[in-house]
Amino acid sequence: MDRRTQEQYIKQIFALSDAHSREDIEQNYRVMFSENQADADTESALSMQESLRFLHAVAMFCFGNLDALDDVFYSLPSRRGPTVLNEWGKIDYGLRRVYSERRNLAYALRDLTPLPDVLFDIDRPRQMRSWFKRHREHLVWDDERGVYIFTEAQTSNGRFSQEHYLDYLVPRSLAVNREHLVELFLNLDDLIDGNLNDSNSDDPRVVAHRIRYSTHYFIIAIGAFCLGYIGAVKYAIALLPPKKYPVDILREAWGEEDLALFLRSYGTIRSTITALRDLTPMPDDIFDTNNPARWLAWFDQNKIRLKWNSDYREYTLRKM
């Protein structure tokens, strides 16, 4: 599924407006959403005006202003574009195209946030609004990557819940939903054989291919672990992404733009390994990020006692 970056959205926003700088966008936004903003005098003109308001709200959202989210939903254009007539009395299809392109900026809600793909529906925004309402206080703008990410969990001991992990992981996996993610995990050995065991070549394209797929498979493994598949832990640890990627090799294989997209999309994936600690009784002193072998030893020691508790949505220890 193609996803656009913050930079791509901002370029399109400037192309669909008369703004030339971020300052122009911010000034226009303040004016357009002020109480003194006059409404257009025809239904078609009003629709185009609303689509322009929506464009500026999305722009603020893409700049990292989460408070603009309410205005994004408030001004979301309808599916049916306005019928605008030109000076010759013909339908102005150019303006209808502009209206449609502005409306499609709503995809920023999916591309720049951990919003699950299954909840994204421009024509049914209620479920998206509900998700953002539930998670809004846990979202923060990451200026370096140009995306919204989850903050540290506001739960006891600063730990993430199962839902936090799955809301983040599933949209970034090869799966379309949680059931599909489980299906991929159950076939993970075949996927690994097909994409990771074919060559030890130093060719940049081969190295880049292995890195991309090993990252995909790590997401699948850690996601399955979060769904109660204890056997996924060994895959998650074995496929744990490195702290630093070989940037020069990836740049040679993919080019600068695709490299930036990869690092932006997967730069924080490694941190989801904390699910091994947050969803289990693993002691904090065992979870040493520099020593994954300790995690594996702890799971080996407790594998008979660990069980998935559906009520608490985490792993607990059986009484022996």
Image (spheres, grey):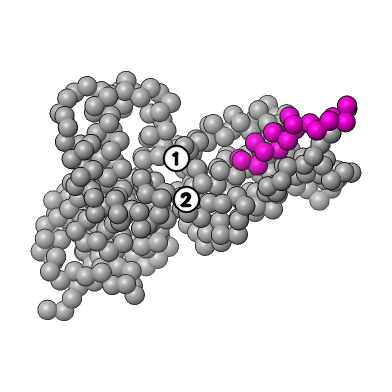
Q: Is residue 181 left or right of residue 56?
A: left
Q: Is residue 251 left or right of residue 82?
A: left
Q: Is residue 298 left or right of residue 41?
A: left
Q: Which residue is mark 2?
A: 117
Q: Is residue 189 visible?
A: yes
Where residue 298 sits: x, y (%)? 14, 60
Query: Magenta stretch: residue 94 in it?
Result: yes
Where residue 76 sits: x, y (%)? 68, 49
Where residue 36 sits: x, y (%)? 84, 48
Place residue 8 in its image quadrant: top right
Q: Which image quarter is the N terminus in?
A: top left
Q: Is residue 16 above or below residue 157?
A: above
Badge 2 crowding class, 10 Å Cα cut-off, few under 14, some 14 to 19, many 20 or more, is some
Q: Main secondary structure of the magenta part?
A: helix
Q: Which residue is mark 1?
A: 1
Q: Is residue 177 left or right of residue 221?
A: right
Tell me the kind of residue under disc 2.
Answer: Asp
Tell me the kind of residue under disc 1.
Answer: Met
Q: Which image quarter is the C terminus in?
A: bottom left
| Tag 1–tag 2 contact (CB < 8 Å) | yes
Under circle 2, the secondary element is helix
Q: Which residues are magenta?
A: 86-105
Where residue 28 sits: x, y (%)? 74, 38
Q: Residue furthest front?
A: 90
Under circle 1, the secondary element is loop
CA distance for labels 1 and 2: 10 Å
| Front one among 200 and 236 | 200
Q: Is residue 281 above or below residue 131?
A: below
